[in-house]
Amino acid sequence: MKKTILKAALFFSLAAAFTSTAISCSNSDDDSSETISTIDPSNFKGSIAAGTTVTLDPSKVYTITGKVLVESGANLVIPAGTRITVAEGANYLIVDRGGKLYINGTATSPVVFEGTSHKQGHWGGIVVLGNAPSNRSALGTSTSELGDLTYGGTDNNDNSGVIKYVVIKDSGFKYNPEKEFNGLSLFGVGSGTTLSYIYVTDGADDGVECFGGSPNLDHIVVTGVGDDGFDWTEGYKGTANFLYVARKKQYQTATEPGNRGIEADTQDTNPNTTFGNGVSNPTITNATFLGNAGGSESQGMKVRAGSNGQFDNIVLANYTTGLDFETDRTLAWFQGGSYIKNLRFVNIATKSKAKNTAGTAVDISTIYSENASAVGAGAGTALPDWAKGWTGLTSYDTTDAMN
């Protein structure tokens, strides 16, 4: 999702069970603030005020019915085993710069976000804004597509909290063809944030997208999303270790069957980009990407718009094209060093193709090394052991991704 800025409406009443908190609330008739001590979990929306902490009760089921905003200086704590349903529409959770989200799931009791009914695009998703740089301005800041809030800055080590052992289902609400949510959107998030054991499934847009920043992610599973599995732009420089990303065969003939395993940009085709904060250059290791032949963007890895990157131990399976690279800056980087190692192709019609900025085809068959024994996320094309159980999955393989 790299689209125009979304002017999302703000909601100002919060519904949650919590411990010792102050909530800032307002409505169209009264803009004053007030402190609320008990609230109905069936109507969870509004702003958590700076200086306060909301802790949810895992014995209750919460229903998000609007926008939940964690303001700068506020904390939202979601204990292991908490279940949060979300009403249909532009309803989502967003963390402002300086706010902190603690999703404290465990392998035996993950936190689950899901729609009140199950379908792609039922609700928004989770959005986190940090103080790490974006390359959209010399100051390292920009305005988020979601929530119309400032993100970014100069602190690569910024800490937005902990997101661990969480399942995100039915996300990706679409306002119009140009504006839609991802499962998890990271805007200028820093490396001090913990992002580990995250499962996004049956979403309408991307699974996880990084807008600049330097977040380090590990043990990520994405299945059955309508667009890309893992997406980045705006000078993202973090790491992603142990990724298992797969299409679902049930969507192969759908209008949005799923697109790329990875879509990588750096914004150098945008005339407003300032490169003082650098190009995208993440490190991706131990990853498996399963596709199918549906749609026009059946590509394992689409790297373009000046993005750099370093890749090791990658399995690509069942895509029409394995590597699809574009633009002079991207090609110069990968032709200048050994940045794609231990790549394994499984049932890939075209292993690699590329074109320069002028649109001329370029041979990139020499920029990567192959390894037929590469295991990717841990078990080749099969679901690795670390992804079993907490995701609700016990197995997954190419037959689950492609008809």
Image (spheres, rainbow, N blue to C red):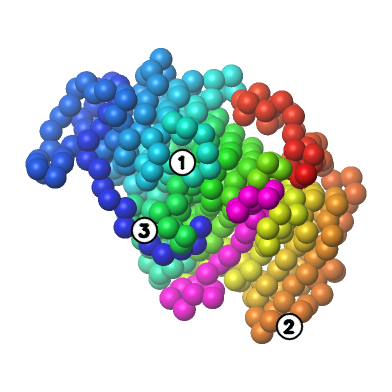
Q: Which residues are magenta?
A: 252-275
Residue named by callout 3:
6
Element at label 2: loop
Report if residue 258 lies within the magenta region. yes
Element at label 3: loop
Residue named by callout 1:
122
Mark 3 Cα shell of 10 Å, populated few (<14), some (14-19), many (≥20): some
Nearer to us of marks 1 and 3 is 1
Mark 1 Cα shell of 10 Å, populated few (<14), some (14-19), many (≥20): many
Report whether 168 appears left or right of 38. Answer: right
| On screen, residue 202 above or below 369 | above
Kind of residue indicated by mark 1: His
Nearer to us of marks 2 and 1 is 1
State whether the magenta stretch is mostly helix, strand or loop. Answer: loop
Kind of residue indicated by mark 2: Thr
Q: Position of residue 84 (x, y in %)?
A: 42, 28
User: Spatial distance from mark 2 to mark 3, Cα to Cα?
Assistant: 35 Å
Count how many numbered circles sit on residues in the image.
3
